[in-house]
Amino acid sequence: MRYHYTYRTKAIDLWQLSMYYIYGSMAGMCNAIFTVAMLILTITKWSSTGSVYRFLMVLVCCLFPVIQPLFVYAKAKKQASGIKEDTEAGFADSGIYIRVGDKTSELSWDTIKRVAKKPTMIIVFSDTVHGFVLTNSVLGKDRESFYQYVVSKIK
């Protein structure tokens, strides 16, 4: 094995992954625009509204930057609670070897669709929606060399 890692995906890892994709998409752009517009509306209309409207404006201002991430974390926590066993992932010139509990899988490099490098993780996609999340804490000092290796194998 060129690279071998044993890890268990945690709720915070799934939350970060979700947040990267939510706020890196068109929906995230709309969320940001909506939040800025609501902040401007709240600031300009604060003095001319009653307490009920002020409460609603503050609530709506908190919708995407506070409330949505809390709900996403709750979903990630529920999803992570279903992960009962460690994942062993081995990356070699012949392919990727995965073991979770007593189940094993081998993937050839031509089945890997892409690799995504995020600030706190690298995701190796086996198809358009499934992949292996390897966080910086799992990769350690091998992060850059691992990323270059995987990229070289899927091209």
Image (spheres, rainbow, N blue to C red):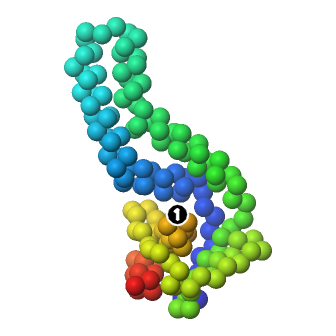
Residue 85 vertical placement versus 2 (above, below)? above
Residue 141 vertical placement versus 47 (above, below)? below
Q: Give me the residue at 42% from left, 32% from top.
A: 63
The x, y position of residue 149, in whole percent, is 44, 84
Is residue 89 in view from this perspective?
Answer: yes
Q: How many marks?
A: 1
Label 1's element? loop
Is residue 134 in view from this perspective?
Answer: no
In the rendered image, the quadrant that contains the C terminus is: bottom left
List the single residue furthest toward the left. Answer: 44
Residue 105 vertical placement versus 78 (above, below)? below
Residue behind mark 1:
129
Identify residue type, mark 1: Val
Residue 60 occupies which quadrant of the picture?
top left
Residue 107 occupies which quadrant of the picture?
bottom right
The x, y position of residue 125, in whole percent, is 50, 71
The x, y position of residue 82, in whole percent, is 70, 55
The x, y position of residue 35, in whole percent, is 32, 34
Q: Give me the residue at 36% from left, 46% from top.
A: 28
Q: Give me the residue at 66% from left, 70% from top.
A: 87
Q: Is residue 87 left or right of residue 27?
A: right
For label 1, the crowd category at 10 Å Cα-Cα, with few meaning under 14, some 14 to 19 and many 20 or more, is few
Q: Is residue 17 left or right of residue 11?
A: left
Q: Give me the residue at 25% from left, 9% from top.
A: 48
Q: Is residue 140 left or right of residue 117?
A: right
In the rendered image, the quadrant that contains the N terminus is: bottom right
List the single residue furthest toward the bottom. Answer: 94
